[in-house]
Amino acid sequence: MTKVAKTSVEINPLLANRWSPRAFSEIAISDDLLIKLIEAARWSPSASNLQPWHFIIGKKHDETYQKIFETLVEFNQLWAINAPILILSCGEKTGKDGNPLQTFKYDVGQAVAHLTFQAISDGLFVHQMAGYSKEKAIELFQIPNHFEPLTVIALGYMGDPLILPSRMQVSEKAERVRKPLADLISQNIFGTASSIINKLK
Amino acid sequence: MTKVAKTSVEINPLLANRWSPRAFSEIAISDDLLIKLIEAARWSPSASNLQPWHFIIGKKHDETYQKIFETLVEFNQLWAINAPILILSCGEKTGKDGNPLQTFKYDVGQAVAHLTFQAISDGLFVHQMAGYSKEKAIELFQIPNHFEPLTVIALGYMGDPLILPSRMQVSEKAERVRKPLADLISQNIFGTASSIINKLK
């Protein structure tokens, strides 16, 4: 199954073909491939090159996977159980001087996007979740005070939507939607239409 | 000039070749190309598909560019003046229910990474900055309360490092560095070495 974004102009096919499935195949992910994904995240940019990201990686049937799975809200457990890999992304909250780092969430988001590009490039799919218990994650993984768990990342090869509970099969096959491009850009004053949009008319 | 990352395993060349230059060429960026970059950001994933990103786009010599430039700290002004495009990225701080959105910075970081990926794919380079005055940005662009300015993005084709002040030429040519991959991943308990790293030895 493919779900190519209906873009208003052509973009890189890796980006147009990316989406967040809930049905994953049982095919296991090799350690070589996991290293490649983390390596892609590693070379992501960050404020002052502080690299405030950390990844706790669970492989299906290991203890780490089981713990990450336990933190998920019930709705996410229903489908994430199919993913061969679950990763908990964490961010470092303070800089070298001990002061709060304003950009750590933004930077970790970028790093996970880089991991995602590499995943798509290798035929994998990624589905990120905010629906999990941070408190439980902090407890189960003994996450230190200066780090914060951010998202749970399910990844693997795409599976058959029929393995999903029936109510999830609808959204799995639904068209991808986004706000109009014109709503995302301004010039001069926030909310004032940008002239570059005229090109689209 | 190329600065390919010395990766421990091979990754997608678009990611390996990406870096954040300070020397940009004078070549202007077409509106078609700008739309492509925003379109890439637009199809980025976000928590509950809320798409909490907004971009204020300045083209060299227009008023928006001048305003974004004014918000930059002096060090960044010294080199960013070369970039044909400056974009202020903003994030929506609250969800549809008016409650704080925990993931907006993370989501905007991802969207800018998608924009960056499209930029590299089209031969452009991106340099993101946190070194600017948020207060001045809020004032100059009348940014509403439920949005927060996050980063300034300089973009364009790569330029000759010799256009930079001499102290910046050193870092422009310096090798790219990152923490060791092993430091970024754990299993079971935060800080416990992951077994996938054995593959690298």
Image (cartoon, coloured by chain):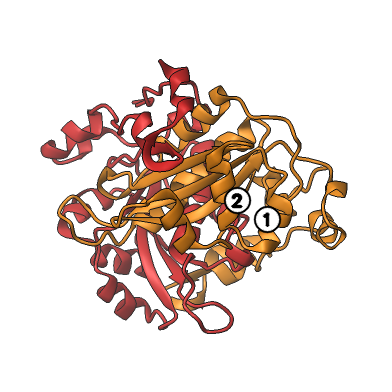
Chain colours: A orange, B red
Residue type at mark 1: give it. Answer: Gln
Identify the element where label 2 is drawn: helix
Res. A165 image quadrant = bottom right
Alpha-carbon span between mark 2 and mark 1 = 7 Å
Residue B111 in the image: state x and y as whole percent.
Answer: 51, 55
Res. A11 image quadrant = top right
**Left or right for A114, reference A101:** right
Tag 2 and tag 1, C-beta contact below 8 Å: yes
Q: Are marks 2 and 1 on the same chain?
A: yes
Identify the element where label 1 is drawn: helix
Residue B6, above or below A79: above
**Left or right for A60, reference B152:** right
Query: Of the numbered discs in the image, which one, if any, rests on residue A77?
Result: 1
The answer to whether residue A196 shows anywhere in this view is yes
Callout 1 crowding tier (Cα within 10 Å): few <14, some 14–19, many ≥20: some
Res. B131 image quadrant = bottom left
Q: Which quarter shows the C terminus of chain A?
A: bottom right
Identify residue for label 2.
Answer: A69
The answer to whether residue B56 shows anywhere in this view is no
Callout 2 crowding tier (Cα within 10 Å): few <14, some 14–19, many ≥20: many
- Most extreme residue toward the top is B201
